[in-house]
Image (cartoon, helix red, strand yellow):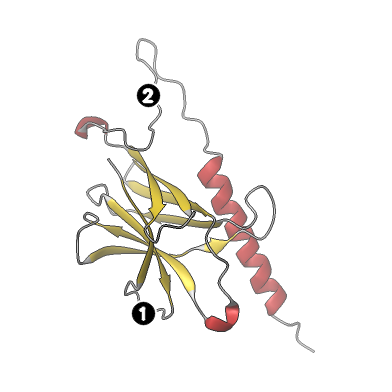
Amino acid sequence: MPMPRVPYIILAIVVLAAGGAYLFFERIPAPPPPPGEAPPAAVLPGTPISDSENRQAAATLRDVRGGEATAEANWTFEQGAFTLGLRAEELAVLSGDQKKFYAGWLLTDLAAATVAVYLGPLTRVPSGAFAGDYVLGYATPADLRAYRGIVVTQESLDDQKPETRILEGSFP
């Protein structure tokens, strides 16, 4: 008799969420700079980065509905790879019966009417230090540094069209 697939799917989701949270919060330290060079400064949300050093950025997302939800997002662009991590706190738990989910999006700016990049659905962390938070990890070889707006929406259809904005923020 074949084994049920549900436990394996749940295990895969938990492993991916935990891995994404680990990569987002426990970054591997960069190698020390060559002798004579200063180490790079940490990037804080809202800190402008010069074009020559435009390799990382961070943003704080705020609840546009006036709620308590917040999120922190950061991206890096190194060796031709763009990676982004996002962790949202205080988002309402969505019932599985409603088939609703949270999704992340990059915009050219927050006022833009057209969404530039669909980042995918956020995953709820089931246990551990970040239990109850929602996380998202995204990686691509495309250079997405020009997209400064980032939003989290609540979706009812998986049609890659944004629905209700929940959180929004900007990268410097």
Residue at (35%, 14%) from the top-left corner? 37
Q: Is residue 85 visible?
A: yes
- In the rendered view, tell whether residue 147 sits above or below residue 27: below
Q: Secondary structure at mark 1?
A: loop
Q: Give the percent coordinates (x, y) of residue 132.
A: 62, 58
Residue that label 1 marks: 159
Specify the amino acid type for callout 2: Pro
Residue that label 2 marks: 40
- The N terminus sits in image quarter: bottom right
Q: Give the percent coordinates (x, y) of residue 44.
A: 39, 33
- The C terminus sits in image quarter: top left
Viewer-nearest residue: 113 or 145 = 113
- In the rendered view, tell whether residue 28 sits above or below residue 156: above
Q: Quadrant of residue 105?
A: bottom left
The numbered mark, 1 or 2, whose residue comes first in the sequence reads 2
Q: Residue furthest top?
A: 36
Specify the amino acid type for callout 1: Asp
Number of the front mark, 1 or 2: 1
Viewer-nearest residue: 7 or 91 = 91
Q: Secondary structure at mark 2?
A: loop
- In the rendered view, tell whether residue 79 sits above or below residue 114: above
Q: Give the percent coordinates (x, y) of residue 13.
A: 61, 66
Q: Is residue 86 visible?
A: no
Q: Residue furthest bottom?
A: 1
Q: Residue furthest front?
A: 66
Q: Give the percent coordinates (x, y) of residue 159.
A: 36, 79
Q: Quadrant of residue 64?
A: bottom left
